[in-house]
Amino acid sequence: MNRAYVNKFIKPYSKPSKGKSTLQIINTVIPYLLLVIGMYFLIRYNVPYIVTLLTALAASLFLVRVFILFHDCTHNSFLTSRKAMSIWGHIFGVLTFTSFYRWQREHLTHHKTVGNIEKRGIGDVWTMTVDEYTNASHLKRFGYRLYRNPLVLFVIGPLYIFLINQRFPSGKASKKEWFSLIVTNLSILAIILTVSFTIGFKYYLMIQLPIIFFASSMGVWLFYVQHQYEEVYWENNEKWSVTDAAMQGSSVYKLPFLLDWFTGYIGYHNIHHLNAKIPNYNLKKVFHSSEEFKKGRIVTLFKSFKLSTLFLYDEKSKILISRKSYKKLA
């Protein structure tokens, strides 16, 4: 696919709409906060906690959508004003426990390096090649197997990323990132203290923990499916192409209508990687605007679950393989 043609074709879709963005803030943040308040009353009036957990699941879907708005702000594609996007990005970051400028830097690095086998390691899912794993030490192999274990990758890991890892700066943190981190952490602390001294810390934990647990797991799963499938694109630096990385290395995750809405249409990930300036509400439109965009790897909801077994990248066959397949190779 010709890059110049792509840029010209999708450029009209890359302009944010103040009206649509405002509507998304209203129909996402307000329902989320109302569900959080509802959880408080469910606990206070001793409704069985399972009802609270089900409400937390609903709230977590809205929090995933909040993160998509946060994500658009990091790409400067949500509003026309960068200052406004920085402010709203930090607000969304507090709600999602994510430091705005740190995540922005790491995620933009992901966009510049996705599918480049020589530039793995920042903002992606740790993926080793067959040769790398075969020649690795026993300790590194154990660490990799532990990392790729679905329980760690989709249950324990997401909580660590958002509750712990995002509370600290990375090794390359700039002054701007430090400021963003401090503002985010202090805001989260202020919310915790306010809730603790008004309704009680127990309420905070019983409300916030299940929401962040469900939302973080769903978020990591979405990211995983977008770039981890059998025939995913990986190339050496000299052969790497940003267009090929988008079309061949980013999936189209076909979700039911409601999940499509809650995930901000980020499932049309090949379009997002073709041009990250396209706001979330235009991704689906672009995808259906040309048959060329439908040639990417389409992953359905139920078929996506088997992708969790993928383990290593085989450079010879140019596919991701499971641990079982690796044992046969070995």
Image (spheres, rainbow, N blue to C red):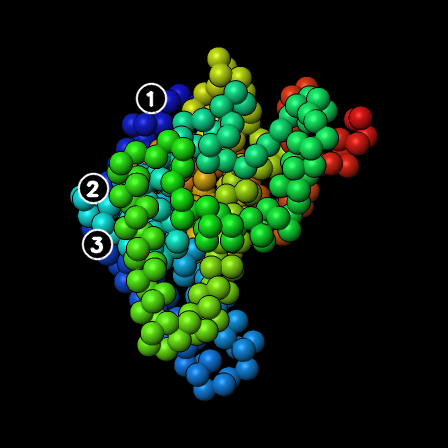
Q: How far apart are marks 2 and 3 (CA)?
A: 16 Å
Q: Which residue position holds label 3?
A: 19
Q: Which of marks 3 and 1 is nearer the N terminus?
A: 1
Q: Do the residues labelled 1 and 2 touch (CB within 8 Å)?
A: no
Disc 3 residue type (three-letter): Gly
Alpha carbon separation for disc pair 3 and 1:
30 Å
Determine the residue positioned at 30% across, 39% down: 177
Label 1 neighbour load within 10 Å: few <14, some 14-19, many 20+: few
Badges 2 and 3: C-beta atoms under 8 Å apart? no
Mark 2, other Cα within 10 Å: few <14 / some 14–19 / many ≥20: some
Q: Is residue 273 above or below residue 119?
A: below
First reached walking from the N terminus: tag 1 or tag 2: 1
Label 3–label 1 contact, CB within 8 A = no
Q: State the residue in front, 5 or 237.
A: 237
Secondary structure state at the residue bearing disc 2 = helix
Measuring from the top left, give residue 86's x and y in whole percent. Answer: 24, 45
Inspect this view and state whether residue 28 appears: yes
CA gap, disc 1 and disc 2: 26 Å
| Callout 1 amino acid | Ala
Nearest the camera: 95 or 32? 95
Mark 1, mark 2: which one is toward the viewer?
A: 2
Tell me the element at label 1: helix
Q: Nearer the viewer, mark 2 or mark 3?
A: 2
Residue that carries the numbered disc 1 in the rendered image:
4
The residue drawn where x is 37% and y is 78% is 199
In the drawing, what numbered circle is on residue 82? 2
Q: Is residue 108 visible?
A: no
- Relative image position of residue 226 (x, y in whole percent): 52, 40
